[in-house]
Amino acid sequence: MNLKLRLNLIITILLLCIVAIGGMYTTQNARKNIQAEIASTAVLAVHMLDAEIVQLGNYTGWIDEPSGVKGSVFRLSSLSDVRHVKVEFFDAQGVLRDSNRADNIIEDNPPPTWFVRAMDTVTTEMPITKRQVYQAGNTVGELVVTPDPSYEIAEIWEDTKAILRLMALFFIVANILIYWAVSKGLRPIEKVLKALTELELGNFASRLPEFSLPELTGISQKFNVMAETLQGSVESNRHLTQQIISLQEDERKNLARELHDEIGQHLTAVHIDSAAIVKSTDLTMVKESAEAIDGVVKQMMDIVHNILQRLRPTGLDELGIEAALQELVSSWQQRNRDVLMTLQVSGDFLDVSEPVLVTVFRLVQECLTNITRYADAEKVDVNVYRIGNKINLSIKDDGMGFDTQIKPTGFGLSGMRERVTGLAGEFELISHKLKGTEVKASLPCVVKE
Ligand SMILES: Nc1ncnc2c1ncn2[C@@H]1O[C@H](COP(=O)(O)OP(=O)(O)OP(=O)(O)O)[C@@H](O)[C@H]1O
Ligand SMILES: [Mg+2]
């Protein structure tokens, strides 16, 4: 069931409860009032009739008038205004001779039976009073006073009807207003749903308008920030993927060139020298050719070593991260002899999985490359240490520094950040113009399987 119907149903149930409780309370009150009024009227009527009976003279002629003709010495018909009790006079034969109620009164709008039944219980709780009428020592008839709530019930019914009509009107108006207000209030949710669906379909430019309700304005602002962030990350992912592809292509081209230029050349040299050995009968020449081959092979070994170093950090598997970093740092130091370089590695890394170690190595490698290219530093400190389940690293220089707010065109820093966050780690870049740069990262130790 949707929200609109649900709210309307709740309101209906609430109103019905209020009507039921109000109805019960009113009925109870009305019954008490009727009871009190009828009781007092009945007592008064009985007193008056008692007085009348006492004052009856000895003329009994009135009693001989033909039966069926209304009227008696009590002139009960003149008491038609006494509405809460029915006063009747029956002669000695039990024939109704006089009453304060006219015959065949048909009310215009009688109350419904259920209402009468709900009210009428008062009469069952009240006694009927009877008085024998004596004249000249004979019983001439009987006066009967019966409580009669029908007028009162009709009156209360009129009031109740008016209240019920008012409530029905209120109920209809309230429901219409609630339906309208909820429809209006829910309209922004349809917009939110539409915007979310667009996001789901990949339209990250989808935004929400500002809503008039303050609660929804918060949602729209948060949604727009989220969509913007998402759009930014998707764009940067696209950018990174393009960078990776072009880097891969560059790397392949480099490899192809090196294989062709360096290895190809050297292999040709080996081929020529070995062919010379095959043909030669002179031992000295064989020796020279073999030495030449040895020299070329050594050069080839260096080339292969360099290529492998670029493709994958050497020594990580065999020697561990500490030795690999030592080698990286000392070869960097050879190229940057003026810089005072320190490397500190502490902790046990034996159980740490390879992707984490490769990331540590690549971060240090990229930072050192950046320092050579941009920092013009005098001092560089590299610190790698393990605390519990975290590997922390810091690469700090005292060089030029740079404005970290400017979006870099290169791939190094964003690649580092991507690598670290990809391993659920934290990355921080601190740099101030002329005050050096520090790259900090903290990586959770994913343990080897
Ligand atoms: N240690 C540093 N000292 C001074 N400036 C730096 C340092 N590290 C980075 N930068 C600045 O940050 C910019 C971005 O560096 P980043 O490594 O992302 O890209 P890049 O080195 O220019 O290119 P790539 O790494 O893709 O070859 C650099 O161009 C440089 O201006
Ligand atoms: Mg770089």
Image: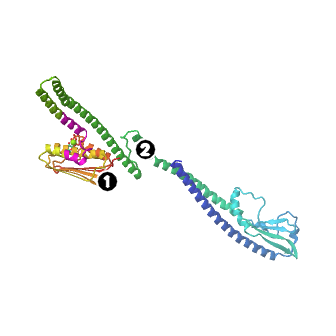
Q: Residue at position x 71%, y 68% from top?
A: 38
> What residue would you read off at disc 2?
191
Q: Return the residue nearer the eye: 395 or 387.
A: 387
Q: Residue at x 66, y 68 (%)?
A: 32
Is 321 in the magenta?
yes
Q: Is residue 91 above or below residue 246?
A: below
Residue 390, horizontal then vertical, whole percent: 30, 53
User: What are the residue bounds of the magenta stretch?
Assistant: 300-327
Numbered tag placed on residue 389 in the rendering: 1
Amino acid at dot 2:
Lys
Q: Residue shown at 88%/76% (left/top)? A: 137
**Relative horizontal placement of residue 392, taking residue 125 as reference (left or right):** left
Q: Amino acid at mark 1?
A: Asn
Could you say which is closer to the camera, residue 433 or residue 180? 433
Compared with 157, 311 (above or below) is above
Magenta stretch: dominant SS?
Answer: helix
Query: Eyeballing the image, is 408 above or below 20?
Result: above
Specify whether 242 is left or right of 213: left
Q: Determine whether, in the image, residue 16 is placed left or right of residue 244.
A: right
Q: Dot 1: within a 10 Å radius of its alpha carbon, few (fewer than 14), some, or many (20 or more) residues?
A: few
Mark 2 neighbour class, 10 Å CA radius: few under 14, some 14 to 19, many 20 or more: some
Q: Are marks 1 and 2 in contact (CB under 8 Å)?
A: no
The earlier-in-sequence mark between 1 and 2 is 2
Q: Which of labels 1 and 2 is toward the front?
A: 1
Q: Is residue 97 left or right of residue 290?
A: right
Quarter holding residue 124: bottom right
